[in-house]
Amino acid sequence: MKKSELRELSLTELNEKLHACMESLQNYRFQLAMQQLEDFTMISKVRKEIAQIKTALKEYEIGIRKIEGA
């Protein structure tokens, strides 16, 4: 997901996306342990996406991004 797409998401959508990415990262790690993971780059891609989502959430927290309608 691009950074511009993350900027358009609301706070609840970001939290849902973060939860989904954390679950997929856990699944990829299990697949890696079971030697069933074919694309090893997926782990680093998901970790990067998690970091981008956490950055966007932190921007809401410190006030860089404003909650729309508030």
Image: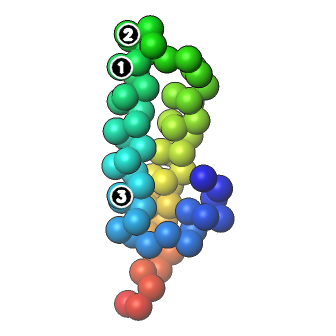
* Residue drawn at 45 percent across, 13 percent down: 36
Residue assigned mark 2: 34
* Residue drawn at 65 percent across, 56 percent down: 2
**Kind of residue at badge 1:** Phe
**Kind of residue at badge 3:** Glu
Decide which of 49, 24 is in the foreground and name it. Answer: 24
Where 9 falls versus 40 (above or below)?
below
Coordinates of residue 10 in the picture (x, y in percent): 44, 72
Q: Which mark is residue 30?
A: 1
* Residue drawn at 37 percent across, 47 percent down: 20
* Residue drawn at 40 percent across, 18 percent down: 31
Decide which of 36, 55 is in the foreground and name it. Answer: 36
Residue assigned mark 3: 16
Q: Which mark is residue 41?
A: none
Q: Which secondary structure, mark 2?
A: loop
**Kind of residue at badge 2:** Met
Using the numbered discs, state the Cα–Cα distance from disc 2 to disc 3 in whole angstroms: 27 Å
- Rendered image quadrant of residue 4: bottom right
Q: Which secondary structure, mark 3?
A: helix
Instruction: Name the mark nearer the viewer: 2 or 3.
Output: 2
Q: How many marks?
A: 3
